[in-house]
Amino acid sequence: MSALQLDIHPEVSAALAEGQPVVALESTLIAHGLPWPANLEAARQAEAAVRAEGAVPATVAVWQGRPIIGLDAGQLEHLARQADRRDASPTVRKASSRDLAAAIVQKAFAATTVAATMVLAQRAGLRVFATGGIGGVHPVSGRGFDISADVLELARTSVAVVCAGAKGILDLSATLEMLETMSVPVVGYGTDEFPAFLLASSGLPVSARVDSPAEAAALCQMHWDLGGAGVVLAQPLPVETALQPADFHRALVRAESQARAEGVRGPALTPFLLARLAELTDGRTLRANQALIVANARLAARIAAAFPKRQ
Ligand code: PSU
Ligand code: MN
């Protein structure tokens, strides 16, 4: 018998029982990705966007060892306050797939990455998940080997991940090669090019393109019927918030060299780089990041609603 017990919010389990659309949302971007209070604002707006499309949001995290599918408002705020260094509440871990078991048995608080959110979402019966950007292959230069478990989880867990591509701090062509090797469809929503998170495009091709929620849902279902697992559904960020590539790369080079100088690596690297980028661009990366999270939540809700109702 499994010792795993999911704590599914009553609204989420009711929606699942009735075959209503539900969208999983991750919590690492809340606790470790965006600064307070932009993180709470983005998290609330993402949930509201899901609701506005007639779906139920389920933000995922580990709460004192309980895997939660659908945080309540108080839990959401508690997690968001973690990003505020002036707040003294207990530390929230950043949990990827491998960290979930420890977080659960040690009764810890943990925010879940894309990978860990996929694991818990699938076990709860959710098929559609929205985030900002997926993790991937970090550039090898200077810091050594670092590939996000998000890529591995996409290869084995059957959840559609709606995103704005992969973070611009990654080696995007290596990330796409890795996803290809892992047989993960990288589907452009309304685009032939892989979106580059804060930038409108990467110049790199997607493996397929869809132009409607129904087409996206049909492609995912067919991939699953074929025994496939994760699907990346990537849409470009809202065009008015996109950064100019030259500005972004200038800031990235500086943030990267600071990370090297300060010896930041491993799970701490992504949060460090995102915080430095926001400072170096007068908050433009932050506003773009927030806008794309909300847009992805909205699209995920439309796609979730386009699946045939489960019996
Ligand atoms: N993209 C963001 N902010 C984030 C992340 C991605 O803009 O905070 C998080 C996601 O939760 C993603 C994780 O799954 O970073 C990847 O971390 P790592 O590279 O350590 O696997
Ligand atoms: Mn890593």
Image: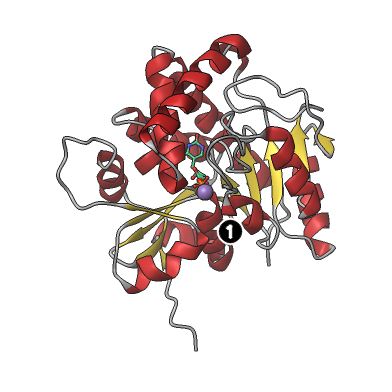
- Most extreme residue toward the bottom, as rendered? 1
Q: Quadrant of residue 211?
A: top right
Residue 299 position within the rendered picture, expressed as x and y whole percent measured from the top left: 62, 35
Residue 59 position within the rendered picture, expressed as x and y whole percent measured from the top left: 44, 50
**Residue under the image location 55 percent in, 10 percent down:** 247
Callout 1 crowding tier (Cα within 10 Å): few <14, some 14–19, many ≥20: many
Q: Compare residues 99 and 165 and report the one nearer the observer.
A: 99
Say above or below: 200 vs 148. above
Q: How is the image coloured?
A: secondary structure
Say above or below: 60 vs 54. below
Say above or below: 170 vs 115. above
Q: Type of residue at label 1?
A: Leu
Q: Quadrant of the C terminus?
A: bottom right
**Residue under the image location 58 percent in, 58 percent down:** 126
**Residue under the image location 65 percent in, 57 percent down:** 152
Query: Left or right: where does residue 109 sit relative to residue 33?
Result: left
Residue 225 position within the rendered picture, expressed as x and y whole percent measured from the top left: 82, 63
Query: Left or right: where does residue 218 sit relative to residue 258?
Result: right
**Residue under the image location 53 percent in, 13 percent down:** 250
Residue 210 position within the rendered picture, expressed as x and y whole percent measured from the top left: 81, 35
Q: Is residue 130 visible?
A: yes
Query: Left or right: where does residue 180 sit relative to residue 102?
Result: right
Residue on which the image places disc 1: 126
Q: Is residue 27 visible?
A: no
Q: SS class of the residue under badge 1?
A: loop
Query: Left or right: where does residue 176 sit relative to residue 48?
Result: right
